Amino acid sequence: MQHAARIAVVLVCLFAVGAGKQKAAGDPDLPSGAWLETHLKWNHPSSSINPQLEASQATILYFGEDHSFAKLMCVVVRVSGEPAAIKDDDGIVLWRGQWSADRKGIAVTHEFVVPRPEHWPEGPVMGPAIEHTIIRRSHDQLSFAEMKFERASELDDDAHHAMLTTSTPMKLPPDQ
């Protein structure tokens, strides 16, 4: 009987040690890098230059390791067999902010940033200046504003660059 009790104690200790090495219950997988909108409509903008070139208007979510967040609306291009890229000479519309994750999802707070002036004229902003949103994560996809997103590591550098080089947040009149 004592032998069985010793075995039980050893098993309980091994289980406790093994459980301590596992990820804590409810600890969310932290997002990172660029996430590209799924279900894009790809077209061939100029078959005379490169018939394999495809482009699509897209929304990209970017999660920085420092908890910075960006939502970009831009044109993404790809050529068969090569990584996709952000085509920034067509302009980028940007929202920038911060993110944090918990069991409920990824909480983001972001505000509209005036687009690059050489590409987009400044004008009135529609909607709230600062938005607070929860992004849901399910397996390998994120759900945000009725859109689905998948990880697109090939866009990490482009999205990070766009977030850093676009102008500062827009200051809205007090009545908005």
Image (spheres, rainbow, N blue to C red):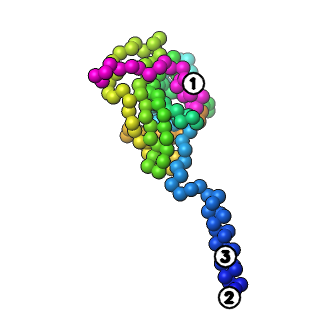
Residue 91 visible to the viewer: no
Front of the two marks 3 and 1: 3
Q: How many marks?
A: 3
**Three-letter amino acid code of the residue under disc 3:** Val
Q: Position of residue 131 (x, y in %)?
A: 38, 33
Task: Tell me which numbered mark, 3 or 2, is placed earlier along the sequence.
Answer: 2
| Structural distance between the alpha carbons of marks 3 and 2 | 12 Å
Residue placed under numbered mark 1 in the picture: 161
Q: Which secondary structure, mark 2?
A: loop
Q: Compared to 137, does 69 lie above or below?
A: above
Which is more toward the observer, 173 or 105? 173
| Structural distance between the alpha carbons of marks 1 and 2 | 67 Å
Task: Tell me which numbered mark, 1 or 2, is placed earlier along the sequence.
Answer: 2
**Three-letter amino acid code of the residue under disc 1:** His
Q: Residue furthest bottom?
A: 1
Residue placed under numbered mark 3 in the picture: 9
Q: Which secondary structure, mark 1?
A: helix
- The magenta segment is 155-176
